[in-house]
Amino acid sequence: MGIPAILLADSRFPGGGHVHSGGLEEAAARRLVTSERDLPGFLLGRLRTAGLLAAVFAAAATHAALRKVHSGYWAALDAELDARTPSAAQREASRAQGRGTARAGRIAWYSSTVDSLLAVTPRPHHPVILGALIGVAGGSPREAAQAAGYLAVSGPASAAVRLLGLDPFAVNAIVAALTPELDSIAIAAESVAGLAPAQLPAPGSPALDLLAEAHQRHHQEEVRLFAS
């Protein structure tokens, strides 16, 4: 990946991603993930569903930014991702991360393209603004897809260390072992980046949707470490 994509995928980027666990907190609370043994399956499942969806839309956004599309495209792209995210809690988490990423990203990579996007959707979905920023910084759709896919697993992996006290070295090795799958997803996302928003794939993750809704409900009843 190029430097802009690396910066945006870095957990230290001030976009607010550190307060989201990607469903891991609720999975841990339900004892679906309790040890290093359980984590690979959770991360792989997340990567192939929510991660693929994020990668597809990030790649499409980069492709659009490189073409300097009109504002109507951004509205359509954001709306199509909204339609592919059945869980209200998931939608809110994505937009919260999108807003944080937009605030930091437009300072680092100011562009009229980003202004055009934010004019029609002030709280964009995270993959959309992620891809747009990578595009205005000169990155490629594949780089955007790699960044989105990596974020889909690195956040939950980090949360697993904090919530369950897992060995950080073992968790890092689990994420590293996903490299071939990450590459495969990035290639697949790149291949459809030029499609019209309505024609983009719609991989679903019903289990993650249910975990997100349950987490939001429990978050209102008791203190949780993560917002999602």
Image (cartoon, grey):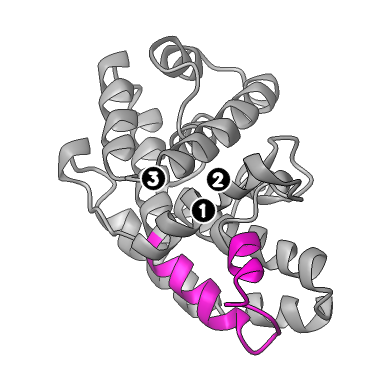
- Please name which of the two marks, 2 or 3, marks the residue nearer to the observer: 2
Instruction: Count up the numbered dots.
Output: 3
Q: Report, in whole angstroms, how far the alpha carbon at label 3 lies from the one at label 1.
A: 10 Å
Secondary structure under tag 1 reads helix
In the picture of the structure, the residue carrying the numbered disc 1 is: 214
Could you tell whether 71 is left or right of 154 in the image?
left
Residue 137 at least partly seen: no
- Please name which of the two marks, 3 or 1, marks the residue nearer to the observer: 1
Disc 1 crowd rating (10 Å Cα; few below 14, some 14-19, many 20+) is some
Question: Does 190 sit above or below residue 121?
Answer: below
Could you tell me the amino acid type at mark 3? Ser
In the picture of the structure, the residue carrying the numbered disc 2 is: 217
Q: Which of the pair 20/34 is nearer the observer? A: 34
Residue placed furthest toward the bottom: 37
Could you tell me the amino acid type at mark 1? Ala
In the picture of the structure, the residue carrying the numbered disc 3 is: 87
Checking the image for residue 48, the label placed there is none
Write down the quadrant of residue 52 in the picture: bottom left
Q: Residue at x 45, y 54 (%)?
A: 145
Residue 5 rendering spot, x and y as whole percentages? 60, 47
User: Where are the magenta residues, as a range?
Assistant: 24-49
71 is within the stretch colored magenta: no
Circles 2, 1 touching at the beta carbon (< 8 Å): yes
Could you tell whether 197 is left or right of 21 in the image?
left
Residue 143 rendering spot, x and y as whole percentages? 50, 52
